[in-house]
Image: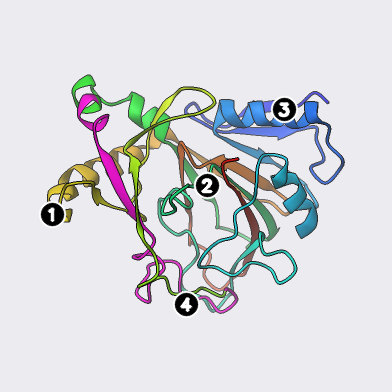
């Protein structure tokens, strides 16, 4: 297999063609896909027909799969999460900038999202390179951030007052309030495969800096959150039926746009843990 790779933006993103993800893929083919994933941070495929079992099998080629602690997976495939917004739903899942699963003690390294049913218009997903965001900072601020850790928690998003994780008729979400813990991660993460450094804070799950109060943390976190979504650090993906996106949670934020009122959107996601 020789993948055809077309970049989608300067900071991150590439669309790959010439591969059927449902078919038997050799180790060499997986290595080629993985290299594109590492190089471009988020990769896209069109016209893929994956059953839940095939999507799960593809994800397992990159590492063990995560079972979400607060959102129920499919009955026969607990690793596969159905991300559904019904026409009557007002909020969507993932409708704000975030990095998947940073609220865990060992965060997930990647997510793979497959489009099953998409609206006639709207529903794009935005991605932002946190490696590009870090590299654009001044040496002085980098020196400050390199010594900090962030406190991450799922409580805000998966509580009864959560912004995006509740109130969807086709998704079963367990309330995390009183169950979830707080976990500490470096504010600047060094990528295990590339050595490239990236910011590792996000508006959904980063509560404060370790050893700082929320009030003390807020000005600097607000600056980082605004800086990290600067347009030059982003790419935007317009979904089509069967499309697949695979992104690196170690260095990428994403944002599912909620701009298709009265329409249904059905996606399936698997999430890859560190080996």
Residue highlighted by disc 2? 108
Mark 4 vs mark 3: in front: 3
| Residue at image coords 68%, 53% | 114
Image quadrant containing the N terminus: top right
Mark 4 nearby-residue class (10 Å; few <14, some 14–19, many ≥20): some
Of the image marks 3 and 1, the number of the one nearer the N terminus: 3
**Residue at the outermost left position:** 216
Determine if the magenta segment contains residue 265: no
**Residue at the outermost top position:** 139
Residue 251 point in image, percent of width and height:
46, 36
Residue highlighted by disc 1? 215
Of the image marks 4 and 1, the number of the one nearer the N terminus: 4
Residue 135 point in image, percent of width and height:
35, 24
Residue 30 point in image, percent of width and height:
75, 32
Mark-to-mark CA distance, 2 and 1:
28 Å
The circle drawn on residue 167 is 4
Mark-to-mark CA distance, 4 and 1:
30 Å
Q: Quadrant of residue 138?
A: top left
């Amino acid at each position: 297999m020789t993948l055809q790779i077309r970049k989608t933006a300067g900071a991150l993103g590439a669309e790959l063609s010439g591969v059927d993800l449902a078919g038997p893929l050799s180790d060499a083919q997986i290595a080629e896909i993985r290299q594109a994933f590492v190089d471009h941070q988020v990769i896209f495929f069109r016209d893929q027909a994956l059953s839940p079992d095939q999507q799960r099998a593809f994800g397992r080629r990159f590492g063990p799969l995560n079972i979400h602690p607060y959102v129920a997976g499919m009955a026969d495939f607990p690793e596969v999460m159905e991300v559904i917004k019904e026409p009557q739903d007002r909020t969507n899942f993932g409708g704000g900038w975030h990095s998947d699963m940073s609220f865990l003690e060992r965060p997930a390294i990647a997510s793979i999202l497959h489009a099953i049913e998409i609206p006639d218009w709207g529903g794009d997903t935005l991605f932002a390179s946190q490696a590009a965001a870090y590299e654009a900072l001044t040496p002085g601020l980098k020196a400050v951030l390199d010594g900090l850790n962030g406190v991450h928690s799922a409580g805000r998003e998966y509580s009864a007052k959560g912004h995006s994780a509740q109130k969807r008729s086709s998704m079963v979400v367990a309330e995390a309030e009183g169950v979830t813990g707080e976990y500490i991660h470096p504010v600047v993460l060094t990528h295990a495969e590339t050595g490239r450094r990236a910011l590792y804070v996000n508006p959904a799950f980063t509560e404060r800096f370790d050893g700082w109060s929320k009030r003390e943390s807020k000005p600097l976190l607000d600056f980082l959150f605004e800086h990290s979504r600067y347009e030059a650090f982003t790419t935007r993906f317009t979904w089509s039926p069967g499309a697949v996106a695979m992104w690196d949670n170690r260095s990428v934020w994403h944002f599912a746009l909620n701009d298709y009122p009265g329409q249904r959107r059905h996606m399936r996601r698997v999430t890859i843990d560190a080996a």
